[in-house]
Image (cartoon, rainbow, N blue to C red):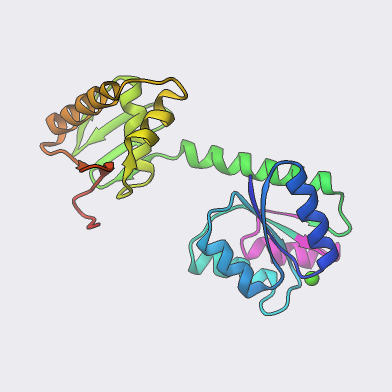
Amino acid sequence: MRVLIIEDDPAIAANLYDFLEARGHSVDAAADGVTGLHLAVTHPFDSILLDLGLPGMDGATLCRKLREEAHVDTPVLMLTARDTLDDKLRGFEHGADDYVVKPFALKEVEARLLALHKRYTGKVTSRALEVGELTLDPRTLAIRFAGASVKLPPKCIRLLEMLMREPGRVFSRKQLESEVWGDVQETSDTLRSHMHILRRALTQAGGYDPIETVHGLGYRLLSRDQDY
Ligand code: CA
């Protein structure tokens, strides 16, 4: 997991940092609220450990800005100094997902972070995807394009899902191949033929092809109401 620690107490921050890094996580740290918020908004983290009392900007304000202004929904585990109901409620009110009370056991912090991450990814992957006139429900694998139902083989669905998770982003052939076929070395014809089936099916259903070949780079998904 990529974890961001926002904590101004150097001893606590170092403890958390060393423990989580030794457990194989990739860790970043900030010692004040402003730096912490900046990192949380500009880098993709899987979870954030956030101290409530911070210099510059307190944890509750940071959390609220993260959710309401930056629209970042990375799970936040709040570290609170006192076990008072007010502190907890304040944290939840501002968008924290869980909290631990200081002093805490490092193992418990990691367990809570993993639980939050699991809950979050489960929520994200089961959410129906929608890009322009195209929708895909990852639970039922039902696909609709411009009102018409689209039937696709499983690997084509997986390709489409990847493109739909980040519309506008250019995926290289290598990225798509390793994500859909795993480590198995397939010839580039495999990807090309699946891409062909996918694009033909979408064109037949919706009357146009929403996938663009970016010459020499790969593929990306466009939608008519978005301009990239
Ligand atoms: Ca503090």
**Is residue 19 placed above or below 178 in the rendered structure?**
below
Determine the residue positioned at 75% across, 62% down: 88
Determine the residue positioned at 25% across, 22% down: 189
Q: Locate residue 15 relative to residue 34 in the image: left or right.
A: right
Q: Locate residue 204 relative to residue 35 in the image: left or right.
A: left
**Is residue 24 placed above or below 31 in the rendered structure?**
above
> x, y (%) of residue 192?
24, 26
Query: What number of labels is visible?
Result: 0
Q: Locate residue 220 relative to residue 85 in the image: left or right.
A: left
Determine the residue positioned at 83% across, 61% down: 12
> x, y (%) of residue 1?
63, 44
Quarter of the view holding residue 39: bottom right
Asked whether 181 or 215 is in front, the reply is 215
Looking at the image, the residue that sits furthest to the left is 207
- Whether 83 is among the magenta residues is yes
Determine the residue positioned at 12% across, 29% down: 204
Looking at the image, the residue that sits furthest to the right is 103
Quarter of the view holding residue 213: top left
Segment colored magenta: 79-99
> x, y (%) of residue 112?
74, 45
Q: Locate residue 38 relative to residue 136 in the image: left or right.
A: right
- Whether 169 is among the magenta residues is no
Quarter of the view holding residue 8: bottom right
**Quarter holding ligand 1:** bottom right
> x, y (%) of residue 227?
22, 58
Where does the C terminus fall, quadrant-wise? bottom left
